[in-house]
Amino acid sequence: MLTQTRTAEFSAGIITAMPSLRRFALSLCRTADGADDLVQETLAKAWAEQARFLPGSNLHAWLFTILRNSFLNQRRKLKREVQDVDGVFSARLHSAPAHDGALDLRDFRTALAKLPKVQRQALMLVGALGHSYDDAATLSGSESGTIKSRVSRARRQLLDLLQVAGPMDFAPCPSATAPRFAYI
């Protein structure tokens, strides 16, 4: 019986506080619809948490605190949201799947292993390690023109093996969090 009395008192207190809550919400939201929504959210939260209300304390102050905190939480949430009516912003928010790059790398390593050893060595010295043609020639004990020829043939053969027609055939560069693979 005590809980029914308490619930009846709580309901009566909420009903008396509603006009004041609406005025306060209207001063915060500046629109009638926003104020009504805020009061409704406040009342729903208060009703759900009425067991936390201490009998004998100030119900109006408790309800106003809930209303103010709900309003502030809505404002914080709005700061993080972006209006994107046309979908322009969301269209830019995509990430390419990481597996495409990993598959491309696997295919590249397989194709690189199929190259003759001298072409693979020349390509790795010039392409992967960044040596000049002259430095690569010195390191491999051959002429600079020979290195240029081997690198050119290796690149052409890689393109044929990988069936690459242009830059659009490659996956985008992997992100910094993608796993790193060692080259041959």
Image (cartoon, rainbow, N blue to C red):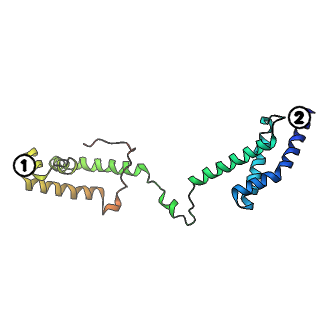
Counting from the top left corner in percent of width and height, residue 147 is at 11, 53
Q: How many marks?
A: 2
Counting from the top left corner in percent of width and height, residue 121 is at 17, 47
User: In this figure, which residue is indicated by the disc labeled 2?
Assistant: 3
Identify the residue at image location x=41%, y=49%: 99
Label 1 sits on a secondary structure element that is loop
Please state if 124 lies on the left or on the right of 33 as rendered. left
Quadrant in which the N terminus is drawn: top right
Give me the C-alpha separation between circle 1 and circle 2: 96 Å
Quadrant in which the C terminus is drawn: top left
Tell me, for residue 142, which label it has, or none: 1
Relative depth, front residue between 95 and 69: 69
In the picture as drawn, the residue positioned furthest to the top comes out as: 2
Neighbour tally class for label 1: few under 14, some 14-19, many 20 plus, Cα within 10 Å: few
Q: Amino acid at mark 2?
A: Thr
Residue 53 picture quarter: top right
Counting from the top left corner in percent of width and height, residue 110 is at 29, 48
Q: Amino acid at mark 1?
A: Ser
